[in-house]
Amino acid sequence: MEPGTSPHDNQQVYLQLIRKMQQQGAYYASLAHIDAYRLQYGNPPELRRLQADALRETGQGSAAVPIYRGLLRGDQSAAAWHGLGLIAASSGQNEEAVQDLQKAVDIEPINAAYLSDLGFARMRAHQIAAAREPLAKAAQLSPSDAKAVSNLALWSLLNGNAQQADAIMQQAKLPQATRDAVLHMAVQMRKASAPAAKTTTTSASTTAVATTTKPVSPGMPHQVPVPPEFSGIPGGVLDRFGNTTSTHEANP
């Protein structure tokens, strides 16, 4: 320990180092330092949350889930619900993702990242109208965040307003690769929602003719594919929903 520094100061410096590693995408390295921190200073809630984040980002969602669940009643609860929501979304559980992300927003209503992810999850769950408010809030709270702006432009496209989407992206000066990725994602989301709408219409028509026909279960979420070519969107607009392959367990 350096002269004039306390153990608490050293702990905070070490935690900041781990946070910075994760901000730079060095999640595996952060896991190693999390183990080292735990041996020296213990296992505080933020460290456990950082561990869960790193596990989720390295494709170990099933290991992250119980850690997040253990943090739902403390000062890391918003981040824990956010992490659970991202894991649910990555496994195609779109309705569950919306519920978890909504809980994160309820706890931290001005967190632009949570709002943006909630809006994106609602779009994937075909809740286009409901996605508008969190996306608009995120874009206005963090106008320089390319992810928030991209998500709002995507909503405009899905809402049938290509001119507005173009204006949003132009005003934010998004690069062409990002604009192309947003346009491509809008096409893919429309394709994904079309079979769902067709199935619902067909089911209703069949039931009208023969009431004994079993309808499609309304509780099953629709999985929207996340193609790898969307890496052009900055800030991980889609990566947040595609890094983990584990199945999100039911909410407590």
Image: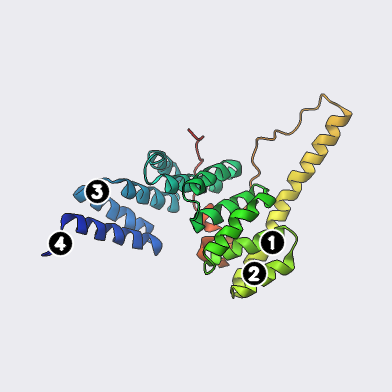
Left-right relation of 117 to 129: left
Outermost residue, right side: 209
Name the residue type under label 3. Arg
Q: Earlier in the sequence, mark 1 or mark 4?
A: 4
Name the residue type under label 4. Thr
Residue carrying label 4: 5
Q: Earlier in the sequence, mark 2 or mark 1?
A: 1
Q: Residue at x 41, y 40 (%)?
A: 72
Residue count near mark 3 (Cα–Cα under 10 Å), binned few <14, some 14–19, many ≥20 = few
Q: Earlier in the sequence, mark 3 or mark 1?
A: 3
Helix, strand or loop for disc 3: helix
Helix, strand or loop for disc 1: helix
Q: Residue at x 49, y 55 (%)?
A: 110
Q: Nearer the viewer, residue 142 or 80?
A: 142
Image vertical order of residue 183 relative to residue 92, above or below: below
Spot occupied by residue 39 in the image (x, y as percentages of width and height)? 21, 48
